[in-house]
């Protein structure tokens, strides 16, 4: 591979300089209690941009739906490894105006991992509990949530792009803070590892939430598309303590928005391992339509 592949273009270097000049002004105003490190974030982004631009060739649609306000960003979880979260975070830094650091909510097991837990905290991720989320929203931060949790990336090949039921915590936080929810979907991450089996019993035995087995050592360069939908506004008649039945109705609507974006995105998917992808895409689109009827 050409070494120039790993270099940023002058345009991207200039963009990163501009983005972090603005972000430093924001983070000078308050000290992050979890150790977010703006300098490490910038250094990491400079290394990852060639992967974002050249390896996964990320496209972003729906930028016009993002305003200069805090959001709870809700996405399908896809791709066996949390690469989708990394790509979404880069998109909101480089391809969304104004740029922002999405503070990704992570599972407790990830936060407790030696070295990895500290590294992810310095890059902006935090343990996804209500107090942490409310603190960030109060400080004008946007949050990235995967309401499917580990179940989202713990899918065998036949279940790719099937959205698991969403948890309710993110919606109750949004009600508490009157924060709009920004739904989005990622298309292409499942094809990074096109043949996967999850060894659930072995994962439980060694204390892991998921253990994907695949013949591939590295993710394939599947083209990634990120679709951003219109914000879902909080209903005035509900509050964080509203009955589960009333909350579930809105969760269902948000899930369906994500499903519809997935169906649209899969129709416009760029060619990649089509002998596997096309039959799988047709089957999944058929299932999505059947459930939506």
Image (spheres, rainbow, N blue to C red):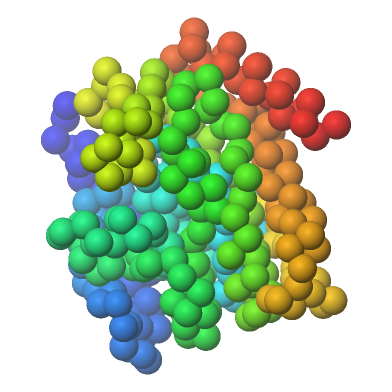
Q: Residue at x 44, y 77 (%)?
A: 132
Name the one closer to the observer, 279 or 226.
279
Q: Position of residue 23 (x, y in %)?
A: 37, 76
Question: Is residue 227 something one can see in this rendering?
Answer: no
Left/right placement of residue 101 relative to residue 290 reads left
Question: Is residue 195 something one can see in this rendering?
Answer: yes
Q: Residue at x 25, y 29 (%)?
A: 218
Left/right placement of residue 153 relative to residue 178 reads left
Q: Position of residue 78 (x, y in %)?
A: 47, 38
Please identify the quarter of the rendering in which residue 22 is found. Answer: bottom left
Q: Position of residue 4 (x, y in %)?
A: 18, 38
Q: Residue at x 48, y 41 (%)?
A: 151
Please identify the quarter of the rendering in which residue 15 is found. Answer: bottom left
Left/right placement of residue 268 relative to residue 26 reads right
Among all residues in the image, which is located at the extreme top? 275
How many numbered tags mark residues here? 0
Name the one closer to the observer, 46 or 123.
123
Left/right placement of residue 242 relative to residue 32 reads right
Please state, as top left, top right, bottom left or bottom right, where the N terminus lies in the image: top left
Q: Position of residue 70 (x, y in %)?
A: 57, 74
Name the one closer to the observer, 177 or 164.
164
Tell me: residue 37, above or below residue 283.
below
Q: Residue at x 74, y 50 (%)?
A: 252
Please state, as top left, top right, bottom left or bottom right, where the C terminus lies in the image: top right
Name the one closer to the observer, 105 or 183.
105
Tell me: residue 105, above or below residue 158.
below
């Amino acid at each position: 591979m050409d070494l120039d592949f790993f270099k940023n273009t002058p345009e991207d270097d200039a963009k990163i300089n501009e983005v972090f000049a603005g972000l430093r002004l924001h983070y000078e105003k308050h000290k992050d209690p979890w150790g977010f490190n703006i300098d490490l974030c910038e250094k990491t982004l400079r290394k990852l941009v060639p992967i974002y631009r050249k390896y996964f060739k990320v496209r972003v649609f729906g930028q016009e739906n993002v305003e200069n306000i805090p959001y709870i960003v809700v996405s399908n979880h896809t791709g066996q490894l949390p690469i989708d979260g990394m790509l979404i975070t880069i998109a909101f830094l480089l391809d969304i105006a104004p740029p922002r650091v999405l503070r990704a909510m992570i599972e407790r097991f990830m936060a407790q991992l030696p070295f990895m837990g500290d590294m992810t905290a310095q890059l902006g991720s935090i343990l996804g509990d209500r107090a942490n989320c409310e603190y960030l929203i109060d400080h004008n931060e946007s949050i990235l949530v995967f309401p499917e949790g580990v179940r989202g990336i713990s899918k065998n090949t036949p279940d790719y792009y099937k959205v698991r039921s969403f948890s309710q915590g993110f919606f109750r936080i949004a009600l508490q803070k009157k924060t709009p929810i920004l739904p989005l979907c990622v298309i292409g991450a499942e094809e990074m590892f096109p043949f996967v089996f999850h060894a659930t019993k072995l994962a439980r035995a060694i204390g892991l939430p998921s253990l994907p087995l695949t013949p591939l050592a590295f993710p394939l360069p599947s083209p990634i598309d990120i679709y951003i939908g219109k914000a879902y506004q909080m209903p005035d008649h509900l509050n964080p303590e509203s009955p589960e039945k009333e909350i579930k109705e809105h969760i269902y609507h948000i899930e369906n928005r994500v499903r519809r974006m997935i169906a649209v995105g899969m129709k416009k998917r760029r060619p990649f391992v089509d002998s596997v992808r096309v039959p799988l895409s047709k089957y999944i689109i058929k299932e999505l339509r059947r459930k939506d009827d």
